[in-house]
Image (cartoon, rainbow, N blue to C red):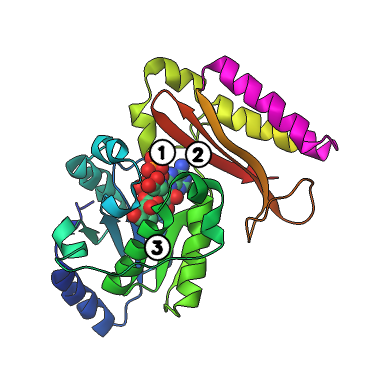
């Protein structure tokens, strides 16, 4: 039970990884923006089980925030994050400053076409360019063999897989199931910003996704199911539903019926918090 060593610079991180490599050890990385919860810790536990050494990264990446107020309000809890990682014996918490990741003159963007045009990509302009750019840097800086991402951010997982394949990055991208609260709400750092009342409303999102999947299996039309789900969410106190779609699990192509592997995806605003979730259909 040790708090992880905290590294702040790419060069110090690389020196440490080089010493592990010299000893023939494998390295796993879990990229995060901090405010750690049990969803993150499940990724870390899986990495620990599969790799000799584990790096958790903590960087609130300004380039992926399309909304300045969202960036400003993003929870920052590095000290308690380090405490939460101690029982998992994580080797390094890599928490670089913005100057390490985006030094003066930084001018490169990694952009994945197609997959990023839909769902969150359509509603958060520039978001996935910011994610793909920073994840590319985290992969090259850590030199990890395996990287762990949650299915809660399913579109992100697919974008990162595409990017790693297309750029021949020598790293395996592993997707891990969404960890939920007992009432079905997907764990998320942004849940910390829900008012107590909004927190009691939030599990409706998961309930409505399950109702949608049940309805689809019963042969009902997606347009009717979507209209009913949206009406119920608005009646329960959600301000706005951004999308509520059935899409192919790999290419995220829009579907109007169940054919092959597919998932239901939702994004909705509750107060000033944007919640996203998805489940297999
Ligand atoms: N409930 C969860 N179950 C499994 N993985 C998760 C869960 N929540 C987040 N993750 C994963 O943890 C990694 C880091 O995510 P991040 O730090 O953005 O946390 P988050 O809870 O998703 O925060 P946000 O509120 O920004 O969505 C991502 O790969 C993300 O998919
Ligand atoms: C992958 C990630 C750490 C990149 O900043 C972020 O998008 C996240 O926390 O899911
Ligand atoms: N969990 C995905 C990161 C973001 O919403 O910016």
Please name whichever residue, 81 or 193, is drawn nearer the observer in this view of the structure.
Answer: 193
Neighbour tally class for label 1: few under 14, some 14-19, many 20 plus, Cα within 10 Å: many
The span shown in magenta is 215-238
Q: Does mark 1 have its CB less than 8 Å from ligand 1?
A: yes
Label drawn at residue 276: 2
- How far across and how far down the image is residue 181, in percent? 48, 32
Give how far apart the Cα atoms at labels 3 and 2 are.
Answer: 19 Å
- How far across and how far down the image is residue 101, in percent? 21, 63
In magenta segment, residue 230: yes
Q: Do residues under tags 1 and 2 come within 8 Å of each other at their CB atoms? A: yes
Give how far apart the Cα atoms at labels 1 and 2 are.
Answer: 9 Å
| Residue, disc 3 | 132
Label drawn at residue 188: 1
Neighbour tally class for label 2: few under 14, some 14-19, many 20 plus, Cα within 10 Å: many
In magenta segment, residue 178: no
Q: In terms of secondary structure, where does tag 1 sit?
A: loop
Q: Name the residue located 18 percent from the left edge and 56 percent from the top edge.
A: 98
Ranked by sequence position, the earlier of labels 1 and 2 is 1
Q: Is residue 217 above or below residue 146?
A: above
């Amino acid at each position: 039970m040790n708090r992880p060593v905290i590294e702040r610079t790419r060069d110090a991180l690389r020196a440490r990884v080089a010493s592990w490599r010299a000893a023939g050890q494998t390295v796993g990385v879990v990229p995060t923006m901090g405010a750690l919860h049990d969803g993150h810790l499940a990724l870390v536990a899986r990495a620990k089980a599969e790799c000799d050494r584990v790096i958790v990264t903590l960087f609130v990446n300004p380039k992926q925030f399309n909304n300045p107020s969202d960036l400003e309000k993003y929870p920052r809890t590095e000290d308690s994050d380090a405490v939460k990682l101690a029982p998992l014996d994580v080797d390094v918490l890599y928490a670089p400053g913005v100057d390490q990741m985006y030094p003066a003159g930084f001018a490169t963007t990694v952009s994945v076409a197609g997959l990023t045009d839909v769902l969150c990509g359509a509603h958060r302009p520039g978001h996935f360019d910011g994610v793909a750019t920073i994840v590319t840097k985290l992969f090259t800086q850590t030199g990890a063999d395996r990287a762990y991402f949650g299915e809660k951010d399913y579109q992100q997982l697919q974008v990162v897989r595409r990017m790693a394949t297309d750029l021949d990055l020598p790293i395996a991208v592993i997707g891990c199931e969404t960890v939920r609260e007992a009432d079905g709400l997907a764990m998320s750092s942004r849940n910390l910003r829900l008012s107590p009342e909004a927190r009691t409303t939030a599990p409706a999102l998961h309930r409505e996704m399950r109702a949608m999947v049940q309805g689809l299996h019963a042969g009902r039309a997606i347009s009717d199911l979507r209209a009913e789900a949206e009406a119920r969410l608005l009646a329960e106190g959600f301000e706005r539903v951004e999308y509520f779609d059935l899409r192919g699990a790999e290419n995220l192509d829009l579907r109007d019926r169940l054919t092959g592997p597919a998932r239901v995806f939702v994004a909705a605003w509750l107060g000033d918090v944007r919640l996203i979730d998805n489940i297999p259909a």
